Image (spheres, grey):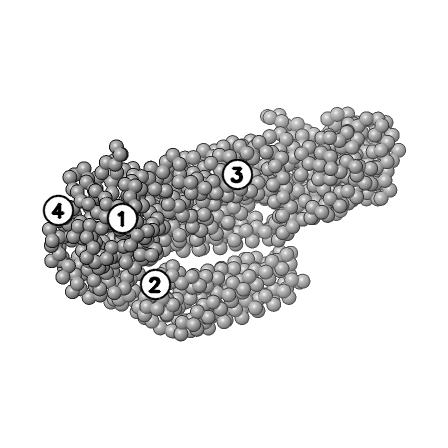
Amino acid sequence: MNTAKHINLWLMAAQNLRRYRAKSLAILIPLILVMATSSFMMSTRGGFIKDAEIARGFLPDVTVQGISAGRVEEISLDVKAGIEDIPHVKKVVPRVWGYLPLRIDETDAAFTLMGIDFAHSVFDQRLPWTIDSGIFPVPGDRNKAVLGSGVAQSFAASIGDKLQIEDTLGNKGEFEVAAIFNSTVQVYSTDLIVVSIEDARIFFGYTEDEASDLLVYTDAPEYADRVALDITRLFKNTRVLTSKALTDLVKEAFGRRGGTFQAMWLILLVAVLLLVWAQSAHISVDVGKEIGILKATGWQTGEIIEMKMMESLILGLFGTSLGVLLGFVYALMGTPGISGYCLGCASIYPKFPVPVHCDFQSIILLFILGVLPLMGVSSIPAWLAGVIDPDEGIR
Amino acid sequence: MILNTYIITYLICSSLSLFVGLTAAVAGLQVWNRWDINSEAEEQYRLEKRVYLIITVLSLGFFLRLLMIPLWFWTLHSMIKSIPGAMCLVGVHNISAPLSYIASTLKLVLPALYGYWLILNLLDRRIAAQPFMKQKLMFLIPLGLLILAETVLDVSFFFSAPPRQVSCCTSLFDIPREGVPHIVTESTWTWVVVFYVLAVFTLAEIVYFIIAQKRSASTGKGKWFGKKSLMLCETLGIIFLFGVFLLALHTRISPLFLGLPFHHCVFCLGQEVWDALFCFCMIFIGLGLLLIYFWVVCSFNYQAVNKALGEKMVKLLKWSGLAFTVGLSVLSLHILRAL
Amino acid sequence: MIKVENVTKNYQSGKVKVKAIHDVSLEIRRGEFIALTGPSGSGKTTLLNIIGCLTRITKGSLWLDDQEVSHFPDHFLSAVRRDKIGFIFQQFNLISGYTTWENVSLPLVPMGVSEKMRRARALKLLEHLNLETRADFMANELSGGEQQRTAFARALINNPEIILADEPFSNIDVGHVKMVIDILADLKKRGKTIVTSLHDSNTPVVKLVDHTVYFDSGKISAHK
């Protein structure tokens, strides 16, 4: 392979793009915009999925909910002892939780109040990592709450404050702010209020032998599927969810949402490709003459085609790189203008930044989407340019 | 039907690949019908222009096909969470097995066929009479049909993904079942030993042909040039070796590397042990290049081509040997460490 | 060295078939200087294009250095053009977006010659043609005579054996005619085979010419 020849053709291609600046920009600008759209979509989708993966660390191996007539409802604590007897089950922790529809300063908000047994806290292994300020409550602490960053901001609450909570359904209670979560898993903690399970029972009106669900911890995560299967077999009217299934559900939801976006985005891509086709399929008299001259001076058809394809490749790589960068920066800025739609929970107040994450595979996908279709569309015009007869081109 | 970014990206590439394959096949058929080197120069030139179209799209297609290999497996991987019961690519393939396995095999075979065509074209263009023109044009018809079949398989695979429970590798291999062939579930060193014996033989063969190819460079003569029977034997031999490699991975290497005595899944191996995936790719590339070598040199025997061939074919063999050796070394080191 | 045997070239102009040259035969030996003359449309340029492998022949055959090239595939003809032929066009045909030296070095690009080497070789030729001060000018900034000399430099950059010049005097002013004649004389002295088309057979260059071939209506009408 004559590497020096290919380098020369690359340089000529780049020079041609500079020479025909207007034409190059007419392709480059729409390409940058389209790739930026795709890039910010992928990096926000990646952010949600990454959050789901981090949050998996907080989830129990198996979550068991009660079901009555096909609907989810409270689960009786009688089930707890039965589950504890299943092989490879380490511990079973009840939990009480529910949603709080609120009005704060004329604004609708929806928070989640979760009551846990502080002796078996799901957060206890990761406290330094998850708590921004304050001290996490210990077993026996009553009327103390740990707030998500969004909740703290909404109530303008700080450590030691007494918080009066009354939701629009009439549930009410008073809690002292003991700690505030940091933003490690923002999507999961921003709207969260963690209290003791006893306080949550009182708040939601649960009886002592009821819980919203049971959190099952196994000897090793590999046993989760087997334990889940045993619970399903042993207890009717239960809904059994493994942590993998829960995170997969989030990934799947955002994956599909991303896919639907991407399908709509294809229309934009096709529009850019049509533009590229219109720009490159029309070979102007000047370009035709140039090709004729090049061929007359000994350039081969294959070399002309290669140079033309390289022009598309350079445009594609440059446009995609800039577009990806632009989209990522837009996502990092919090997708101004459309963050509410991205988060999909319009009632959370105040808003929190859209999570952003971009991995190697996503970048490769973006480059495939930006470069390959462009090369495909350019291949026929490149061929048409390459096979211009030298004498006809010059004439 | 499942729709995510990977699937959409893959489908775009698949459409492009279909466009490449059909354009090349149709143009190839048109030229093949009328190609006659002794006819009017103007008519030949018109046909040559079409050949340039074929070369352009197939060159693009070759790079596309190389990219489509990882993209296909990433896409399947992205579907794991959407398919109940799937934990690795076995579960995803089980959506529409055995057709999905055929689709995956085509992903690996098609780049080799493109590569073969491009090498044939490179050699053909070195001689003014272009002696392989008809052969290389004819080759495009089955190539186009394979791509069409592959696209149909891919599209039906993505669009038929059902929301039902599928079985995955765990249910098939973790617990040995009756009815599953013994050869699949047994944890034996036999196939690993057979693979190493054949691998050493293959390396010796590569070295032999590098030397022989270098010697033939000046004369353009070699006993193996144009030997169709050798091409057939080597093709079958290399396919057999690859099959033995898969069996070696499946029966002993997977359980050894994954640390689970009953877990034989090759896909889990590739998913979780990156150097196993690397050596799989290297051994596949090494054997693929060796196969291309035999297809090229055994397809015809033109002295002028043989001379032109010399240097390129030595390079091809060297790359084949290098990839195969690297793959084999990584595999051996990992086996020694695991033991 | 150059043998044209019973060559016919037809062009298709819409639905009309135009016979550009008909059954032309000609033999040119190495180092000869041949002039093709005749009225406009008589087929001089078509024959030059055929010898220069720029256009395919409809019938007949073309031999260069004992090789029958008329049936060569396209990429072989390109190689012939690059290695053996230097073409000077009537309209010079420089690419306006490139500088003078870049235009001169165009044939070297696909040969893999580095930019530094290309520039060095182009400058050497431009110096020989007294154009070194114009090396970095854009092609469209050059005068007619300078463009003509640049076109000569481009044709000579690969040191070809055959020089084909299409009406080299038709687009330059009188002051530059002598300069072009001097270049051609120098090339002849260096043993190059030169074929030129001339609209006017009384141009002073005919003194250098070994043979003059007269064209009329696509056929050779006389040979002197």
Q: Which mark is residue A18?
A: none
Q: Residues within 10 Å of mark 2 (few under 14, many from 20)?
A: many
- The amino acid on which the numbered mark 4 sits, given as a three-letter code, is Gly
Q: Chain of mark 4?
A: A
Q: Chain of mark 3?
A: A
Q: Chain of mark 2?
A: B
Residue B6, image x and y in percent? 39, 47
Q: Chain of mark 1?
A: A
- The amino acid on which the numbered mark 2 sits, given as a three-letter code, is Cys
Marks 1 and 4 sit apart, C-alpha to C-alpha, by 26 Å
Residue C103, image x and y in percent? 71, 38
Residue at left offset 19%, top offset 57%? A140
- The amino acid on which the numbered mark 1 sits, given as a three-letter code, is Gly
Label 3–label 4 contact, CB within 8 A: no
* Residue named by callout 4: A205
Left or right, C184 with respect to B42, comes to right
Q: Which mark is residue A160?
A: 1
Say which of marks 1 and 3 sits in front: 1
Which of disc 3 and disc 1 is earlier in sequence?
Answer: 1
For mark 2, give the secondary structure: loop
* Residue named by callout 3: A378
Do pointers 1 and 4 mark residues of a single chain? Answer: yes
Q: Residues within 10 Å of mark 1 (few under 14, many from 20)?
A: some
* Residue C121, placed above or below residue C223: below
Q: Is residue B40 visible?
A: no
For mark 4, give the secondary structure: loop
Say which of marks 2 and 1 sits in front: 1
Label 2–label 1 contact, CB within 8 A: no
Residue at left offset 19%, top offset 39%? A167
Q: Residues within 10 Å of mark 3 (few under 14, many from 20)?
A: many
Q: Which mark is residue B265?
A: 2
Do pointers 3 and 4 mark residues of a single chain? Answer: yes
